[in-house]
Every structure is written in C-alpha cells, then in structure tokens.
Amino acid sequence: MWNYDVALIGLGPVGCAAAILFAEAGLKVVAFERDTEVYRLPRAVNLDGEIIRAFQSSGRGKAVEALMQPVRPGDRAGFANSMRQWMFGVEASSFGSNGWQPMSMFDQPEFENYLRQQAVTHPLVTAYVGVDVHDARSDDDCVSITFGGDEVVVARYTVACDGAASETRKALGIDWLDLGYDHDWLVVDVTTKKRHTLGNDTLQVCDPDRISTYVCTKDPYRRWEFKLLPGETAEQMLETETIMSLIDPWTPRDTYEIRRAAVYQFHAAIAAKWRDGNIFIAGDAAHQTPPFLGQGMNIGMRDVINLAWKLPMVVRGQAQDALLDTYYSERNAHAHDLVEWAVEIGKLMEHLAEVERCQRSGLALPEEQTRLKSSGYGQGREQPPIREGAVVLDQVGGQGSTGYLFSQPIVENASGKHIRLDELLGAGIAIVTSSARMPVLANDTQALVDQLGISMVSISKLSVVKGHFDRLFEQYETAIVRPDRIVFGHTTDKLSLDDLIRQLARKLHVIA
C-alpha cells in the first residue's frame, strides 16, 4: 500500500510546479531534492502566458505575473544581420490569447525561489530537501523510493523531474533520440548599469564571422550567446578578456558586470519513452532543446500541467490508468515539434549568415529555404495542436480550435466585475456554450457531467473587456474544455453535445 499519491524526484522549477499543481488538485505529494538551496544563477529566462494561466486557478497567477518583466518600449524579437540591422521578427505584446502577457522575461533564481517556497510549504506536500534518491522501483501498482539513509516511502505514482542528466531515466534504461543539433556555445549573463547602451531588441545575429544571440532579459539583466568557432576551446572562451571583447561592440565595459559565463553544448533530443510502469519522466529528463525559441522550461511546465489533471482523475477512481498513456502520446509529439522548430531556427541563422557571406564575396546566393524562413519569429508558424490523445482527433486542424488552447479574454460579468474567463470555468472540465439557453442533456450524459464535476458556462451575456472569445464560436455553438484548457472538441451539425460528452468519457477512459 502506498503512503503518497505521487512522488516527485527533483524540485527545480518543473518539479516545484508539479508539486503545487498536484497538491492543489488534492493529491498527497512527497518530493525529493538534492540541493538545499535554489541554484543562484540564471538559466531559463522566458515564460509563456499559458504557464502563468496554469497557476491562475489556484490564485497564484498574479503573484507569478508580478515576478515577470512587463513589456518595455521597443520590446521585440527577431533576426538581424552582422551590423545588427533588423531583418524580420515579432513585436512584444502585453496581452495574449491565454489572458496574460504571451512571453515574459524573468530571473530564474527569483522565480524558482517563489516556486520552491510555494511547493514545500503546501499542506499536502512533504518535502525532503538535501537528500539523494538512491532507487525508484515500480511494482504492479506503486513505486518504492529509497532515499537518504536508506529510508523508503511508497507512492502510487512517481514523476521524475531530475534534469537532463536524470538518474531516473538512466536507471530505467531510456535512450535519447537525437534530433540533430549539437554545437558548443558560450553563454554570458550580465547585470547592467544605468548608463548602458543596450536596446530592447532580442536578436538572433546572423553574422558570417560568428553567429550570436542577444536576449533582453528581465531588467537589469541581459544575456549573450556566442557560437564557438572551430578550434576554440571552453577555457579560451571563458577568459574575461575574451568575453568582454565579444561584448565590446554592444556596450562599453564599464556599463555591466558579468554575472555568469559558461560554455554549453546545445542539444536537441527526445527521450524514447516517458513512462515505465508507474514512473514518468518530465522536463529536461524527457527532452533537450536549443534555446532559440525560449521553450526549454516551458515544454517541461506543459508536461506537468498535462499530468496535473490526469493523475488526479485516476487516483480519485474517475478514470482508468490507461488515461495516463495519453501523457506520452500528447506531450512527446508536441515537444518533438517544438524542439525541431528550435533546431530549424538555428539552421535559419546559419542560412542567413551564409547569404550575407555570399553577398560580401559576390558569390551566388544559397538556395532559398522557404521552410526555414517560415520558422522565424513572426513568419506564421505557431505552436502545434495535440494530434493524438484525449481530443476529438477528426476535428484537429479544422476551423475550430480542437487540440489547441482555449482563448481566455477578460470579460465583464453580470455584476460588472472584470474577470478572466477561466474564473467562470472553474479548475476542472468545462462545457462552454454561446447559447443563452443551457443545454438539456440525456440522463446518461448528465450523470457523466455530475460524476466528473463538469461545469457548464454560457458566454452569451458576457462582454469582452480585453482579448476575444475563442474562434470556434464563430462557427460552432458549444465546446468541451479540458482542465489544462485544451479544447477537447466542439459540437457540429452532426455531433450533438450528448455524443461529444460520450466521446469524452471514452477518450478519458472514465470508470462508470
């Protein structure tokens, strides 16, 4: 018999998010972390609005938002030539379809300290900090975890968020699938002084002499990433004079202090499987990506957001364990697409640098790479939908939003209060309709609605204050939205709400 519903190995940002989300769903959580303190230097710098949205239902959305950098005048992200002249990209926005700032710069030590504090002090979380996990062994219906001085706890499920060097993944014998990007880069973080001359553009600098990236992170910090050239060593690149000489074209030496410098090999890889018995891997333990999309930590957050509603349904006896198999089918494909996208941005930088090299030398230009260009910021490529798993698959890619995140505007309710739409939907599954009349269901589907605690919301009398209702309501009347705010499916002329609910029950492996 197990002592806990779920165990977490690793309390980095993804592990802490998992602890908070699982506990808020009512699960009894035990968590293990080797390091007694949060790592004090920055790594991840960008948080997507959908991640802030995930903290919204527990009342933490505004606290997380307060740790983010508000949009600054001139904030944008794009591609530049060797003279740092803008070629193309996207302007920053302060409000997006998830109801929050779409992309927010943050300082990881500050953000992670907040997450760690929220996780370890939650009444449903027991945290063992400063201990090593020696073994995690999955039996028929639980996982035995040995830690510290050979102490043992038993959890029904375990989620390992123990990083790219995951001991859990290695112990399970799970291999990496290489996606074809392995290059050494120097990463430099600085703290700026008031007289610095740095702009607010985040730039992929496609210089034939050295490709680099400049990231306008949360004030007062900035980051550069410089690709190593053949023959250069990490030792050479980490010399202070080398670092400063690379930054010299950007700003005088007395306008900043070096906060961190490290040479990394940027990888692109996906774990061959994400589940072994009752053990799951998530975050960097399951995928590695070059940083060109700013999605490394965001992908990991989506992993645990996906599990944070499925595990509780199984633990509560609402759904069969088979629901948890959709974790891999949904998250692996989505992560794979984003890692490949990041790789293509790296290749696009190299292509644009080669174009400039040929222009300098009067040589024939390389063949136009339309697909690579479409991967650039603001060039039309978007995050992919869920193409397999717990959605109405034959609707994915249609005119609705099935498989995508449901739009969240700020609305005015009947009492005149301005709220984000999710506050009306609640934390669980929701049926949302544009009809003024709430649908009348058949006995069996009403029983499912009651069993699963599905909320029913009409948007007909709500007025939008900011943003817009989901595009699906332009053609369809009613949709089912999952707890992670992915659209499960919508009604059509041929698919009634009763039948849509029955599909939901089958897809979620609901226990009658």
Image: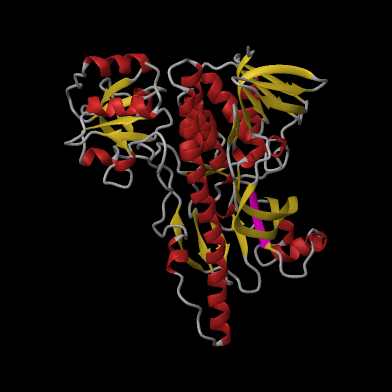
* Residue 139 x, y percent position in the rendering: 64, 22
Above or below, 283 against 363 in this view is above
Above or below, 342 against 131 in this view is below
The reply to whether residue 173 is visible in this rendering is yes
* Residue 17 x, y percent position in the rendering: 58, 30
* Residue 479 x, y percent position in the rendering: 28, 32
Dominant secondary structure, magenta? strand
The reply to whether residue 409 is visible in this rendering is no
Q: Residue at x 41, y 27 (%)?
A: 483
Above or below, 301 against 245 in this view is above
The quadrant of the picture occupied by the C terminus is top left
In the image, residue 218 lies in the stretch drawn in magenta: no
* Residue 196 x, y percent position in the rendering: 65, 56
> Which region shows up in magenta?
221-226
Residue 377 appears left or right of 265 = left
In the image, residue 222 lies in the stretch drawn in magenta: yes
